[in-house]
Amino acid sequence: MRQYLCGPFTRFGFLVAVGACLVDQLSKLYLLFGFDLANHPTRLGPFFDFVLTRNTGISYGLFQTTAVLGQWVLLGFKAAAVVLLWAWLAKAENRLTALSLGLIVGGAVGNAIDRLAYGWVVDFVFFHVSGANWHFNWYVFNLADVAIVAGVVGLLYDSLVGVRAAKAP
């Protein structure tokens, strides 16, 4: 059991996870109670708006469910993923892997807190681009989602380019 709590980079990954979760939760609380986003989206510039979206599904709004059983299934899936990622973190052999896994775990926990507190995940960043004859809208997301994506990118980089990446023959 001790090996899952005290790997060489586990403390660093844990601190990253706590930081990612705190930044995510603080941003959501600020936007939920400091702005009236439900009735008045806030334009941040030509490409970004703050809007309030209640995401009852998972990434990018997949598997939307308002049923209590569905919410618990999604929470159970998330808890299992966090446990598996934590076991990986305990065996991390470098800071990039620990950083990446910490970001993913922190983001997952941040979104799980929303699901427990509200029954849905708070999403608020809306990215969009328009041209003369076209318009592109990205999904509405939050800082937990940014942490998860950054963590996945870090893991991909580490596995493809990192010191221990598999080398072609």
Image (cartoon, grey):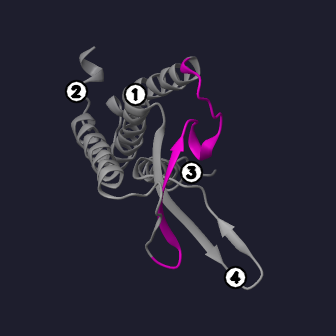
At 69% from the left and 82% from the top, the residue drawn is 131
Label 2 residue SS: loop
Q: Which mark is residue 131?
A: 4
- The mark lying in front, picked from 4 and 2, is 4
Q: Amino acid at mark 1?
A: Leu
Q: Position of residue 123 (x, y in %)?
A: 48, 49
Mark 4 to mark 2 CA distance (whole Å): 52 Å
Please report whichever mark, 1 or 4, sits nearer to the chain's N-terminal start.
1
Where 78 falls versus 141 (above or below)? above
Q: Earlier in the sequence, mark 2 or mark 3?
A: 2
Q: Residues within 10 Å of mark 2 (few under 14, many from 20)?
A: few
The residue that disc 3 covers is 167
The answer to whether mark 1 and mark 3 are in CB contact below 8 A is: no
Q: Position of residue 39 (x, y in %)?
A: 48, 58
- Circle 3: element type: loop
For badge 3, the amino acid type reads Lys
Give the extent of the magenta segment: 45-68
Q: Nearer the viewer, mark 1 or mark 3?
A: 1
Give how far apart the Cα atoms at labels 1 and 4 are. Answer: 40 Å
Q: Residue furthest top?
A: 1
Would residue 86 be found to the left or right of residue 60 on screen? left
Element at label 4? loop
- Provide the secondary structure element on which disc 1 rests: helix
Q: Given the image, on which type of amino acid does mark 2 rest?
A: Cys
Residue under label 1, please give it: 116
Q: Residues within 10 Å of mark 3 (few under 14, many from 20)?
A: few
Label 2 – label 3 distance at C-alpha:
30 Å
Q: Position of residue 3 (x, y in %)?
A: 28, 21
The amino acid beneath tag 4 is: Gly
Q: Residues within 10 Å of mark 1 (few under 14, many from 20)?
A: few
Residue hosting label 2: 6
* Circle 2 or circle 3, nearest the eye: 2
